Amino acid sequence: MIELHPVTLADKPWIDALALAENSPSADYNFGNIFLWDETYHQQVGKLDGRMVSMPCYEDTPFFAWPIGSGDIVPVLDEMRALAAGQGFPFVLRGVTEDHLPMVKSLWGDACTVTEERDLWDYLYAAEKLDTLSGKHLHGKRNHIHRFEQENDWYFSPITADDIPACRRMLDRWMETCGEDERDGINDEYAAIQRAFQCYDALGLDGGMLWSGSRLVAFSIGEMAAANTFDAHFEKAYADINGAYTMINREFVRYIRSVHPQVEWINREDDTGRPSLRQSKLSYHPDRMVEKYKVVLHHG
């Protein structure tokens, strides 16, 4: 029987262990994303037979995430279906990756509908590529870097607890100046970033700041998602400073590679369907995509 409860920081150790067992590059499964976005998704979580059962709720509609972990998944899925039936809502799985689809089709076949959710696909980049920005496809990025270096007396530094107030102030100023195309879902993201600041050390997050003289102009925050994959949760920079976004991206990746030398991939998460964000992520020429699907079971 599944016993679910609201996610808290106390859940981090066992969820971390199951995420490590799953070892998926998806951004959906690490504890940080589960906890940081809880004001939006109000997730209920529980452990069953070596797997995590997670039931988020968005716009008053509950659904399940793929039950990460190890061990026989069939009885866990059966319990999840029973829970949905008992509470009177359809059995819907989201965040189902391409790796999971053969299992889904083997279990349910035509009894389920599988829908591609392109807006939620994660962008994966080779860490070395984002570090060096080499190759003709990234020539424009190198130009942005060169311009930033010419126009700013800059330096990069890791985020520590003492830096959180400065990051908060920058986030508030960024909120005041961000463009209209950046405002989609901005309140939800703002709440998630504030949670990251509040629980920065407890969550074991990594972060970096980009400075122009004494002015903080960009920051980025993330965490390990899998054995060789780092998940960049948030990246904010002032758009009126030429090259600031490109520079914080490169410098943060360089920092992450220095503290986590095992990192081969950087997950820069999804684009939520926003055209400007999609264009930005595609401009770095992703090496892989983490494809995600929604699975709806028709009966059972």
Image (cartoon, grey):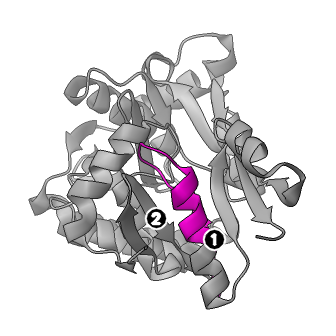
Please state the horizontal and vertical placement of residue 130, each as a whole percent of the image.
Answer: 48, 25
Q: The N terminus appears in which quarter of the rendering?
A: bottom left
Residue stretch in magenta: 59-81
* 68 inside magenta stretch: yes
Confirm or deny contact between disc 2 and disc 1 (CB under 8 A): no
Please give left or right for residue 263 compared with residue 299 in the image: left
Please give left or right for residue 113 compared with residue 17 in the image: right
Q: Amino acid at mark 1?
A: Arg
Query: Alpha-carbon distance for marks 2 and 1?
Result: 11 Å
Please state the horizontal and vertical placement of residue 74, each as a whole percent of the image.
Answer: 57, 52
* 261 inside magenta stretch: no
> Which residue is drawn at the image coordinates 16% and 59% (left, top)?
163
Is residue 13 in view?
yes
Q: Is residue 269 above or below residue 227?
A: below
Q: Residues within 10 Å of mark 1 (few under 14, many from 20)?
A: some
Q: In front: 150, or 144?
A: 144
Q: Which residue carries the number 2 mark?
A: 53
Q: Is residue 182 above or below residue 264?
A: below
